Amino acid sequence: MVKISLNGKCKDIQVIPNNGFPVRCKVRVELSRDIQLTYPIHEIELFVPAEYATLLEVGLPLTVTLDQTHA
């Protein structure tokens, strides 16, 4: 099992046109600067159902957790 948690701040939430799919949102997260990366990228973008995006607020802290279980 692998689990990665990234802390940051919600920088932007945009509605993606549905184009025949259920409405989705793009959530942009600026990662905390205390993460030791060897390259200058400190942002991630997530595409989530609109119902989840409505629970988030721009400017507030956010933790993104990636969890993978090996079969």
Image (tube, helix red, strand yellow):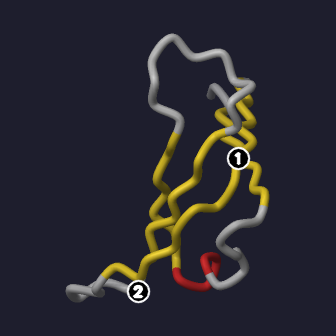
34 vs 50, nearest the viewer = 34
Residue at 46% in and 53% down? 45
The C terminus lies in quadrant: top right
Q: Residue at x 65, y 85 (%)?
A: 54
Estimate how packed mark 1 is, as few (under 14), some (14 to 19) or many (20 or more) residues with alpha carbons within 10 Å.
many
**Mark 2: few/some/many CA within 10 Å (<14, 14-19, 20+):** some
At label 2, which amino acid type do we have? Val
Determine the CA span between mark 2 and mark 1: 25 Å
Judge depth for marks 2 and 1 and give the one in front. 1
Task: Tell me the residue at 61%/85% (across/down).
Answer: 51
| Amino acid of disc 1 | Gly
Disc number placed over residue 18 in the picture, else none: none
Residue at image position (40%, 86%) is 23
The residue that disc 2 covers is 23
Q: Which residue is mark 1?
A: 8
Q: Is residue 68 above or below residue 11?
A: above
Residue 70 placement (x, y as % from top left): 64, 26
> Which x, y percent locates residue 67?
69, 38
Q: Is residue 5 above or below residue 12?
A: above
Q: Quadrant of residue 22?
A: bottom left
- Tag 1 or tag 2, which sits nearer the N-term? 1
Across and down, in percent, residue 44 comes to 50, 45
Q: Quadrant of residue 2?
A: top right
Q: Are marks 2 and 1 in contact (CB under 8 Å)?
A: no
Q: Secondary structure at mark 2?
A: loop
Q: Residue furthest top?
A: 38
Secondary structure beneath label 1: strand
